Amino acid sequence: MNRREFLTLSAITALLPGTTLEAARHLLQMNGYPLNMETPLELLTDYLTPNELFFVRSHWIPRMPDLKKWQLTVDGDVKTPLKLSLAELKKLPIAEATCVLQCAGNGRGLQNPTMPGVQWRYGAVGNARWRGVRVKDVLDRAGMNPSAAYLQLFGSDEPPVKVPPFHRSIEMAKAMDDCILAWEMNGVPLPPQHGAPLRLIVPGWAGDHWMKWVMRLSASNEPAKGFYMDTAYRWPITPGAPGVAFKPEEMRPLTEMAVKSNITTAPKRARVGMAAEIRGFAFSGAPDIAKVEISEDDGATWHAAELDTRHSPHAWRLWLYRWTPRHAGRVKLLARATDSHGAVQPREAVWNQSGYLYNAWHSAEVEVTA
């Protein structure tokens, strides 16, 4: 490592406590402030993405709390407002979920025409096992009133002066169904860069809902207001042609992830008649992936890949396709997934002005020799 690289990596670890030099060397830094880092696609080969390889998405730099004084505030439309320490939360029934976290803008850098925002390509995604307490159990303890239709969320990250705060809300039905407040990631305490001491886990939904550094939950009869609800993280009700822009009222809040597969492992060269292994992962906002298929003739015919036996609702499925080339030349292999609701990954992603939920067919090119 030369001096310039060392100083750059040292700056990264200083900005995000808990990020090691080794992790910073593997991740791709997308910008400097706030710090956002992408995982190279070829490293996303494990069922559980190692914490040190897990992508980092930040809106602002958080204020890291003193855990001896930290408390979660639960207020709003509840009978008994609460302040709970981490120790008190851990006395409630434990909940676990293995599921995919994907930034809503993953793939934005692949959209055409381009649009502003972090130019993620493929690696703003990972699969982890999260452990904590169900949101439902916390709200039940507070005695939530029937009129509360939304859960408003507040974290400890503070924006620069005159910049809108990252305040969000989710529908109460989703919060009470399967959301978790996690303090553990892949069997260890939640790292600071991933939201310690507490992060909201929203299985099946895009990462904009997964509030980091949670400090407060507020039950309400209306959604949160502000830029990150009224303008950002919205999806066109009726999508248009590339380049078409929509007004906020012509859009709805972004929720479920779109069905998607990616190729992580493929040889650069292969021989006619000799088998080669093609690997990748697939996921969806639906509970599971039904199948992954590979094509070597631009989608005219498709062949089923083998799905890994490890899976859980809203987790990704690793897959393997054993491919034997039949002809010499340059071959483009295509991958597409179908989820458990029957949704099929499209050839082209739906264009939208913020570059959300990119899920076009992924490809890998292989030079085949005789």
Image (cartoon, rainbow, N blue to C red):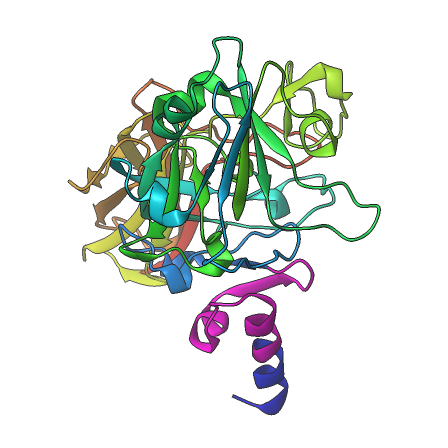
Q: Is residue 361 magenta?
A: no
Q: In the displayed structure, would residue 309 be above or below residue 224?
A: below
Q: Residue furthest front?
A: 80
Image coordinates of residue 309 in percent, x first then y, are 15, 40
Residue 39 visible here? no
Task: Left or right? Give the position of 66 relative to 267.
Answer: right
Observer-nearest of 323 and 69: 69
Q: Residue furthest right?
A: 162
Residue 280 visible here? yes
Observer-nearest of 56 and 348: 56
Q: In the displayed structure, would residue 314 be above or below residue 98?
A: above
Observer-nearest of 12 and 29: 12
**How many numbered callouts?**
0
- At x 52%, y 67%, the residue is 17
Image coordinates of residue 60 in percent, x first then y, are 66, 53
Q: Residue furthest bottom?
A: 3
Q: Is residue 25 magenta?
A: yes
Q: In the displayed structure, would residue 56 be above or below residue 12?
A: above
Image coordinates of residue 105 in percent, x first then y, are 59, 41
Image coordinates of residue 350 in percent, x first then y, are 58, 27
Q: Which residues are magenta?
A: 10-35
Is the C terminus in the top left, top right, bottom left or bottom right quadrant? bottom left
